[in-house]
Image (cartoon, helix red, strand yellow):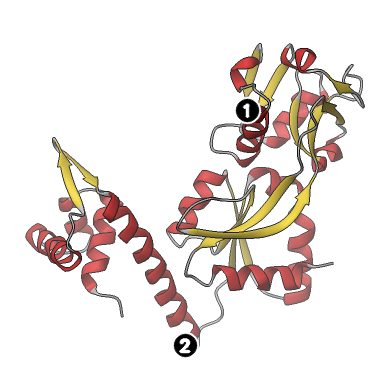
Amino acid sequence: MLDFRIATFLEVCKTMNYRAAAANLNMSQPAVTQHIQYLEREYGCRLFIYDGRTLTKTKEAEILERYSDAAMINEQEFRSRVSKKEPEPLRIGATKTIGEYDLYDSLTEFSKNSGAQFSVFIDNTEHLLDLISKGKIDFALVEGAVSHDFFDNRLWKTVPFSGLCAPDHPFAGRTVSWEELLGETLLLREKGSGTRMIFESQINLRGYSIKSFEKIREISSPKLIAQFVKAGQGVSFGYDSFLKDGLAAFTVEAEMTPGEFHYVWLSGTSGEEKTYLFEKFSRE
């Protein structure tokens, strides 16, 4: 059983307000303060400080929060396994591109072969990592590897990454110059999405940035981007799975390197075990 003061600490991290944490825990505010002060003495560091009237977490608190989240998730997992309750559904996260274009067949096979229940959460990479850290999902399938001390990942599959345009667009099936490309309207995912991060990193390596394009439209839905591209209202970049929507592909002078889809989970939890479970039963 986790130290009850850790639960208090996590509630303060969640609310960033001693009074609100006390109310949520049915405790007095002085008791909450005492719990935090005990942990600060125990670990020999400050966990929270005030910047004016705003409560902020120290770097040490952020580290303790992640470790505590993992410990809490593991304890809940243990309680579930030793109880006689029905197994919890597998909670899978996926970025919007993967969820809308690449996950259906794997989920169908997983359901058919395992008979297990599952739930799926579709969001961008940034929000999925937050759900993982809070124990809301077991693992996620994201575009690119996640470089972070508190998350682990492994490769799911490699997929071609190329330019996308309408079938009757002058770029269709061609290799185009950067000068030609930069004059086009670029249809781009929102900040925090895996597709955008991969695209930005690749063009940065070639000495360009998003600002190099004359016109940019940000759209959070991959399906809506595909519709605009198909209608000839701009070009975009993505994976071969987008071609299912009737789009055409093109390459740029320096061809884009393939994209990678990864499993990602919170370090020190059963997330890794569950990725192997999913992979085992989702193979066609």
Q: Is residue 219 left or right of 20 when viewed as pictured?
A: right
Question: Disc 2 on helix, strand or loop?
Answer: helix
Separation of marks 1 and 2 at Cα, in angstroms: 50 Å
Packing grade of label 1 (10 A; few <14, some 14-19, many >=20) is: few
- Pointers 1 and 2 in contact (C-beta within 8 Å): no
x, y percentage for residue 206? 68, 26
Residue name at image x 61 percent, y 62 percent? 119
Rendering quarter of residue 161: top right
x, y percentage for residue 34? 10, 63
In front here: 181 or 130? 181
Question: Disc 1 on helix, strand or loop?
Answer: helix
284 lies above or below 131: below
Q: How many marks?
A: 2
Farthest-out residue, left: 30
Residue name at image x 60 percent, y 36 percent? 197
x, y percentage for residue 279? 72, 68
Q: Is residue 11 left or right of 150 when viewed as pictured?
A: left
Rendering quarter of residue 105: bottom right
Q: Is residue 225 left or right of 63 when viewed as pictured?
A: right
In front here: 283 or 162? 162
x, y percentage for residue 259? 73, 44
Residue name at image x 38 percent, y 59 percent? 66
Q: Nearer the viewer, mark 1 or mark 2?
A: 1
Q: Which residue is mark 2?
A: 82
Mark with earlier residue (1, 2): 2
The amino acid on which the numbered mark 1 sits, given as a three-letter code, is: Asn
Rendering quarter of residue 214: top right
Q: Quadrant of the N terminus?
A: bottom left
Q: Which residue is mark 1?
A: 204
The amino acid on which the numbered mark 2 sits, given as a three-letter code, is: Val
Packing grade of label 2 (10 A; few <14, some 14-19, many >=20) is: few
